[in-house]
Amino acid sequence: MSPSPGATTVACKYSGRCRRKTDGMTFRFSTLFCTTLLITASIPALAEAPRTFSEAKKVAWGLYAPQSTEFYCGCKYTGKRVDLAGCGYVPRKSAKRASRIEWEHIVPAWQIGHLRQCWQNGGRKNCTKSDPVYKRAEADLHNLVPSIGEVNGDRSNFSFGWVPEQKGQYGSCLTQVDFKAKKVMPRPSIRGMIARTYFYMSKQYNLRLSRQDQQLYQAWDKTYPPQAWERQRNQQVACVMGRGNEFVGPVDLKACK
């Protein structure tokens, strides 16, 4: 399948040299970076969105390759291996799982499917086999991000929220998990994106959000508005999915062709 020049144009529109510091990490968008991106990570304009979670993961590897930065802690990775030392991550329990990248649903598969009939009759596996709406939601790239495996496992299907500060739970990682309360407090720079992803998934797949969650995500959306990297990601994902996340901002699908 041929690459989409429009997608790479959008991906590189922040050329020149600029720096954005987030939780101590600096992202550099330079002419050299964009040249590399044009060669190695052009996003194809697919005829249709991924049909399964497996297909979505394959596309996601290419989508995130240019930055190769995982979601919850901001750690860099190469292939499937995470550079834990480079970001000060200290495994809480499983060093083996912490060292690998896994693909995380921001809105968990459980939250997407547990009230559906297919889940009642056989859980997630049955929904993947028999429910076309669930399959589309599970494969939606707007809801998929790379994560340190250990954090992905610890997050489980816990909801996001405020938790008491636990310094050093994962070393320098600012995301925290409260297992007793079954809550996760993400690092500040991704809170807005998490909120906007929940709004998108709720509208796209008719998922109910509790009043408490609505209030939390409205606050995060206001406090942490979309940054350049999130708008860029929205455009790139839109080129694959055929639609953007309207809560992030407009996209130009014509640029994908």
Image: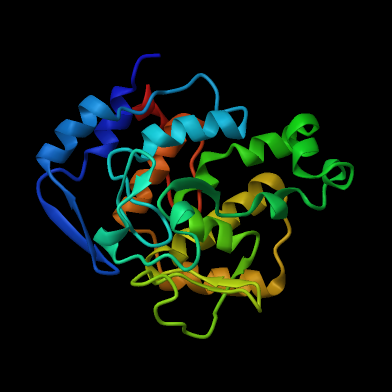
Q: Position of residue 238 (x, y in %)?
A: 45, 36
Q: In the rendered view, would you say 183 is above or below 53? A: below
Residue 93, position as x, y percentages in the image: 50, 66
User: Residue at 18% of width from left, 32% of height from top?
Assistant: 36
Using the rendered view, name the quadrant where residue 80 is placed. top left
Q: Residue at x 28, y 23 (%)?
A: 5
Query: What count of labels does the image hold?
Result: 0
| Residue found at the far bottom of this picture | 164
Q: Is residue 165 above or below residue 86?
A: below
Quarter occupied by the N terminus: top left
Q: Is residue 252 visible?
A: no
Q: Residue at x 65, y 72 (%)?
A: 182
- Residue at 59%, 36% (x, y): give it: 139
Which coloring applies here? rainbow
Q: Is residue 177 left or right of residue 11?
A: right
Position of 211 with respect to 195 (left or right) is right
Nearest the viewer among 75 and 16 is 75
Does the rendering let one see residue 60?
yes
Query: Picture coordinates of residue 240 (x, y %)?
Result: 46, 30
Instruction: List the single residue furthest toward the top.
Output: 1
